[in-house]
Image (cartoon, helix red, strand yellow):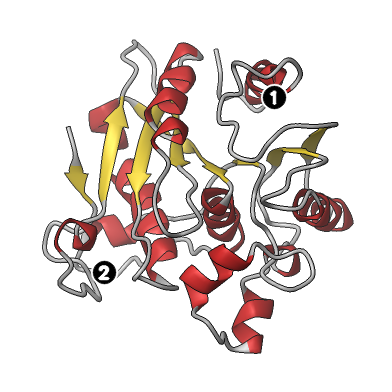
Amino acid sequence: MELKLWPQGTPGALGNGAEDQPVLVPYLVQGDEPRAAVIVCPGGGYARRAQHEGEPVAKWLNSLGISAFVVHYRVAPYKHPHPLSDAQRAIRIVRSRASEWGIDPGRVGILGFSAGGHLAATAGTRYDSGMPEADDPVDRQSCRPDLMVLCYPVITLADPHAHVGSRTNLLGEAPDAALVEQLSNENAVTPDTPPAFIWHTADDAGVPVENALLFASALRRNGVPFELHIYESGRHGLGLAEEHPEARTWPALCANWLKKQGFAK
């Protein structure tokens, strides 16, 4: 089942066919009591969405008793703010249909890999509590996630630690310096930012580990709870890392953290 994020027409649609119709794919867990939910944002440098960071991750969350939703947010040629608008819309949709789907609207998190991690961190640092007077009932819902899981995330768009491909796809070849600063998420953390689980590899050749360290430092300065795991080595884009001798432990570590947050069974 795929649900259009914008069934009445996507704001800012460019006329590019399927990419004009961002969708949400639910992976629901049935139960007697409302479940936690997590929005999954696959990576792909804001140019594509990596399949191995979508459905397999949703099914892993299901194994923890968490309902999951993979969001097919817009990527290039779409630029900011469209991916963020899609992620925020996904969170609002889940909350608006929480009773129908057996979800606790107070336990809705977001998880992202690489550029999807940038999107998740952006959603976790830029949100609103909903627009009570909106005609669309979905827009009346808060888009603040209750927690973030950030996997080898792009965090900063500023040199020297930026992932240039993600920055170019999101902001263009010659981005405005103020926008680069604004969307470098280490600059947007406040004491109200939701808690985060972060992992990365120290020798990641795609997205420098400094991205994870910058965000963790910002969370620490603002008194936001977080858990950070840095593995000594491992290529970029590991996903669930089932074949990696060390990083394969991250799902179990994250499951423990999600349990502590009241999300996992």
| Residues tagged 2 and 1 counted as in contact (Cβ below 8 A) | no
Q: Examine the rendering and report whether any part of residue 97 can be seen.
A: no
Q: Residue at x 69, y 52 (%)?
A: 207
Residue 162 is situated, as x and y percent measured from the top left of the image, at 70, 65
Q: Amino acid at mark 1?
A: Trp
Q: Residue at x 14, y 62 (%)?
A: 17
From the image, tell me which residue sits under label 1.
257
Q: Amino acid at mark 2?
A: Ala
Residue bearing the label numbered 2: 134
Q: Is residue 170 at all visible to an observer of this figure?
A: yes
Residue 50 tag number: none
Which residue is at a point 21% across and 75% down the rendered structure image? 14
Give the image location of residue 214, x and y in percent.
81, 57
Q: Viewed as shown, does residue 18 lie left or right of 128?
A: left
Helix, strand or loop at mark 1: helix
Q: Give the side of residue 219 with respect to residue 94, left or right.
A: right
Tell me the SS state at disc 2: loop
91 vs 260, left or right, is left
Q: Position of residue 101 (x, y in %)?
A: 27, 28
Mark 2, other Cα within 10 Å: few <14 / some 14–19 / many ≥20: few
For the residues labelled 2 and 1, the Cα–Cα distance comes to 36 Å
Looking at the picture, tell me which residue is in the foreground, 23 or 225.
Answer: 23
Q: Say which of 42 and 6 sits in front.
A: 42
User: At 67% from the left edge and 50% from the top edge, which residue is drawn?
Assistant: 206
- Give whichever of 131, 45 is nearer the camera: 45
Left or right: residue 127 compared with residue 246: left
**Is the residue 73 above or below the residue 226 in the image?**
below
Residue 22 image position (x, y, % from top left): 25, 54
Look at discs 2 and 1 and give the one toward the viewer: 1
